[in-house]
Amino acid sequence: MNSNINLDIKLDENRVPESIQWSAPDGGVEKSQADAFMLSVWDGKTKDTLRIDLWTGDMLVDDMKKFYHQTLLAMADGFQRATNEDEISEDMRDFAKYFAEKLKLVG
């Protein structure tokens, strides 16, 4: 059984993303618009992380700050599920809270 997640990136003349669409048919997502995208892939042979970070030219800086904050929280949740390391996962959440406070994302 295979499952696919597809990205369709439209670039401008400077190769900056104008639009990002993604589809995950098994999850019921078809050509959903996005303003930013992050992908991290672990290469087991080289023991290194490969990354793709894309965002459209229309992505607002305030939205990017929120995107990173929410990604930090999601990483803490995923790390906890993958490793059962509760204490360090909570430390990651504390950093995300600090991040949000420093950027004035929360009152």
Image (tube, grey):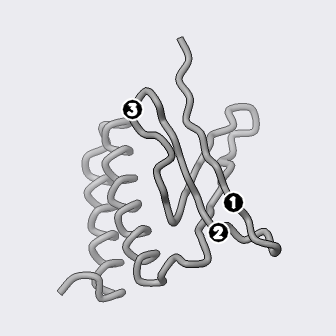
Q: Quadrant of the C terminus?
A: bottom left
Image depth: mark 3 or mark 1 in front: 1
x 30%, y 37%: residue: 84
Labels 1 and 2: the sequence-earlier one: 1
Label 3 and label 1: CA atoms lie apart by 23 Å
Q: Which residue is mark 1?
A: 10
Residue 87 image offset from top left, x and y in percent: 26, 52
Q: Are marks 3 and 1 in contact (CB under 8 Å)?
A: no
Labels 2 and 3: the sequence-earlier one: 2
- Please, what is the three-letter code of the amino acid marked with disc 2? Glu
Residue sitting nearer the eye, 1 or 95: 1
x 59%, y 48%: residue: 40
Label 1 and label 2: CA atoms lie apart by 5 Å
- Seen from this angle, which residue lies furthest left? 107
Q: Are marks 1 and 2 in contact (CB under 8 Å)?
A: yes
- Please, what is the three-letter code of the amino acid marked with disc 3? Gly
- Seen from this angle, which residue lies furthest front? 31
Q: Which residue is mark 2?
A: 18
Labels 3 and 1: the sequence-earlier one: 1
Secondary structure type for disc 2: strand
- Please, what is the three-letter code of the amino acid marked with disc 1? Lys
Residue 61 image offset from top left, x and y in percent: 48, 83
Q: Which residue is mark 3?
A: 27
Secondary structure type for disc 3: helix
x 39%, y 62%: residue: 72
